[in-house]
Amino acid sequence: MMRKKFRLPDLGLVIGGSLVGLVLICGVFAPWIAPYHPNDQELLYILAPPVWADGGSAAHLFGTDSLGRDTLSRMIYGARTAMTVAAVASLGAMLLGAFFAHLAGYFGGWVDWIISRTVEVWLSFPPVVLSMLLITGLGIGIDKVILAIVLVDWTRFCRVLRSEVQVARGQDYVAFARLIGFSHLRVIMKEILPATLPMLITLLSLQMGISVVVEAILSFVAMGVPSDVPAWGQMIADARIDMYGAPWGLALPIAAIFVTVLSFNLFGDGLRRTLDPRHAANRGT
Amino acid sequence: MIIAILRILARRLLAIIPVFVVVTILVFGALRILPVDPAQMSLPPSATIEQVEAKREAMGLNRPIWEQYTIWAKGAVAGDLGESSQYRMSTAAVVLDRLPATIELVICALVFAVGVGVGGGLLVFSARDTVLETVGLVVISAVMALPDFLLALLFILVLGVLMPIFPVNGRLEPGMQVPTQTGFLLIDALLTGDFRAFFSALHYIALPVMALGLAFSPTIMRVLHASLVNTYQQSYILQARLRGLSGREILFGQALKNAMLPVVILVGTQFGGLFGGTLLVEMIFSFPGLGNLMVKAMQTSDLSVIMAISLIYCATTLLFNSLADALAYLLNPRLRNG
């Protein structure tokens, strides 16, 4: 007899996950998928409409921009920039935030006081303002964008995870682990981290969506990646000038950001529903 | 009662002062690390090395950084925020000139967001256990994936270019003028009784407000919906139903008051995001407020303006956080024991 009932996987998780996977594939295999090099200019063929609009041609499926660059290729390469930033920056923010969250939540006392006050100071900056301030100081470049996102968004992880750690810290099994003489490091890594991991993974997925937006914002105001690196935000800024004549050039990169952020959000929410034992238990009955 | 409320407010406002002082130190320190010479920036490009050196001395730039900070702090307390290097006039005047536009924008956006958010949340909740609830929640999560600057661009594209209903640039019809009294265009227009200017200003502010407000509202809807679902599981709702109250009486008379609490906290803690959003939205709509000024100051390394505006953003964010905290405390008797 089969005891375990087969359960359909969470719908948001599946849809979000496959869309994220799709964008990721576009990013990783950009040179093989993209029909043109993203910076190749065809000056005789500028601001071409996409194939479904009047005057579109199959040579440039999504049309071209004001310098005659192929929009589809630039979007595919833009996925590469967006996903690089999303993955590295979110992971960095997670590591930094989780580190301080575990310190603060586990040790409490003055360690907690200092870390909590630091987070408070950080949160008094609107995130957009802080990241732009940092870029003014750091200069532009993918690595600078990543650093800025890590330095701004670690507080998101720290704030939420700290209370999770505090809950886990109060559990009997943690007290027991201390009693039998485990070191602090071992207790945190082996006893507390597994308890906070579901929340950590969920936050990571949501943060990736946020990172995509921040990268787009910074590229949009020309404070992100250098101009020879294709990025969605930069495409939007370029296309804004010609939006009366070529609205698709503006709409397509917006759609790319929207779909990517939406799929990260769906994926994150799906993860939360699937990984949270309380939620999963409710659903099972 | 009023004294008690004032005491609660005062305690929270006092608590933000040390945080704000730390913020000023951090921003000041960060801006001094930048490879920009404020003395050179504040002089015309033709200035000689001696002149720059004299200016450096006058501005105190050769002294240790903590002394520079003390000089700045003393001036700031007296209302002197230094001189803007791009406008060659007092930073305080430049910033104060733009401040009302941003405040107007952010308040309108907040009202719009709370209105749409609470309305939408109630709507989705009242359709509970039907397909419409699911549809509503899907729409909410879709809109949540559209940050304010993308919404702003979409609105420009759809309502400014494809169907030109709304203007997409500036605050007022070109050629129209309203005598400045408060700096808040909508209020000034009403004060002078110029309704044409009032509607023009309303027309111009509509898209920025919608972009900012609509980006914030799905979060409110979601939180209100979840909070109402929780509230309805409590026994006093069942009791109210047994007493024979109608669905409407239960929702508005009993449940909503308690369910609003998380919304109040959300609005307070997320206000910084809304306020920060004005930066991009103003830039996109060429709305002459702080955000536009900030972007320009960042591009020209106008340090004193960057500093002043950053501090305004931080102070406002802190203020709203503590106001929301005080309000939540006043609304929820259970928090008062702690």
Image (cartoon, coloured by chain):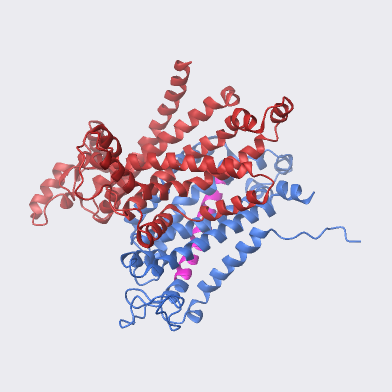
Chain colours: A blue, B red
Quadrant in the picture for residue A221: bottom left
Question: Any magenta on residue B167?
Answer: no
Left or right: A209 in relation to B190: right
Position in image of residue B81 (x %, y %): 23, 39
Outermost residue to the front: B196
Looking at the figure, which quarter contains the C terminus of chain B?
top right
Q: Nearest the camera: A219 or B54?
A: A219
Quadrant in the picture for residue B314: top left
Left or right: B49 in relation to A201: left
Position in image of residue B264 (x %, y %): 51, 35
Classify B8 as above or below B182.
above
Q: Nearest the camera: A48 or B52?
A: A48
Left or right: A245 in relation to A173: left
Task: Determine the residue positioned at 75% across, 47% down.
Answer: A282
Quadrant in the picture for residue B48: bottom left
Position in image of residue B247 (x %, y %): 66, 33
Classify B245 as above or below B211.
above
Question: Any magenta on residue A80?
Answer: yes
Circle count:
0
Chief SS of the magenta region: helix
What is the span of residues highlighted in magenta in the rendered image?
A78-101
Q: Nearest the camera: A118 or B247?
A: B247
Q: Nearest the camera: A138 or A126?
A: A126
Residue B270 can be seen, yes or no = no
Task: Determine the residue positioned at 39% across, 75% down.
Answer: A49
Task: Determine the residue positioned at 69% across, 58% down.
Answer: A10
Residue A57 can be seen, yes or no = yes
Left or right: B47 in relation to A96: left
